[in-house]
Image (cartoon, rainbow, N blue to C red):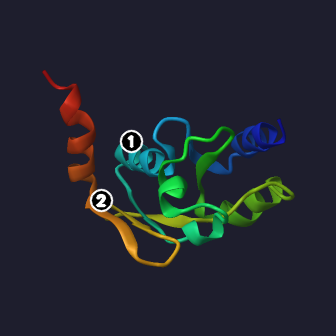
Amino acid sequence: PKVFAAVHKAISDGLVRACHDLSEGGLAVALAEMAFAGGLGADVTGLSQLTGLGDEARLFGESPTRFVIEAKPDAAEALAGVFAGLPFVRIGATLAEPRLRIAGAGGEWLVWAKLSELKEAWQKPLRW
């Protein structure tokens, strides 16, 4: 309940541009879907902060009560304050280039793909 209350407060306070749960496909899928929707790319380099998990679990784990939030640039400090005392880490940044890069805990790039390629792979099985 505390995490949900913090997410609600952050949204209500206008600190959030976008928010996605990690229930279907985990973090990697949520990041890709957010990038598709906004037409923005992302560099994710902070997975090492998610301790106790391997890269596969970090990227595709579907454990409950996890969210990825895109914050307004000037809202990072206020957002951290809303989540004080709760699990909260900055994992990356959005960028104008239409691609997604995700570094593993060891710093190597696990994902480096154009959004158009990712979106095609995501939509292709749905076509008749």
Q: Which residue is drawn at 28% across and 53% down?
A: 115
The C terminus sits in image quarter: top left
Q: In what element is the residue under mark 2? A: loop
Question: At which x and y percent is residue 10?
Answer: 73, 46
Work out how far the residue at label 1 is from the one at label 2, CA to CA, in angstroms. Answer: 11 Å
The N terminus sits in image quarter: top right
- Numbered tag placed on residue 37 in the rendering: 1
Question: At which x and y percent is residue 86?
Answer: 81, 54
Amino acid at dot 1: Ala
For this orientation, the residue located farthest to the top is: 128
Question: At which x and y percent is residue 70?
Answer: 56, 53
Q: Residue 85 occupies which quadrant of the picture? A: bottom right
Q: Earlier in the sequence, mark 1 or mark 2?
A: 1
For this orientation, the residue located farthest to the left is: 128
Amino acid at dot 2: Pro
Q: Please determine whether, in this image, residue 99 is positioned above or below residue 15.
A: below
Tell me whether circle 1 and circle 2 mark residues in contact (CB < 8 Å). Answer: no
Does residue 104 appear to the left or right of 53 in the view shown?
A: left
Q: Residue at x 81, y 38 (%)?
A: 5
> Dot 2: within a 10 Å radius of its alpha carbon, few (fewer than 14), some, or many (20 or more) residues?
some
Q: Residue at x 27, y 49 (%)?
A: 118
- Numbered tag placed on residue 107 in the rendering: none
Does residue 22 appear to the left or right of 36 in the view shown?
A: right
- Numbered tag placed on residue 98 in the rendering: 2
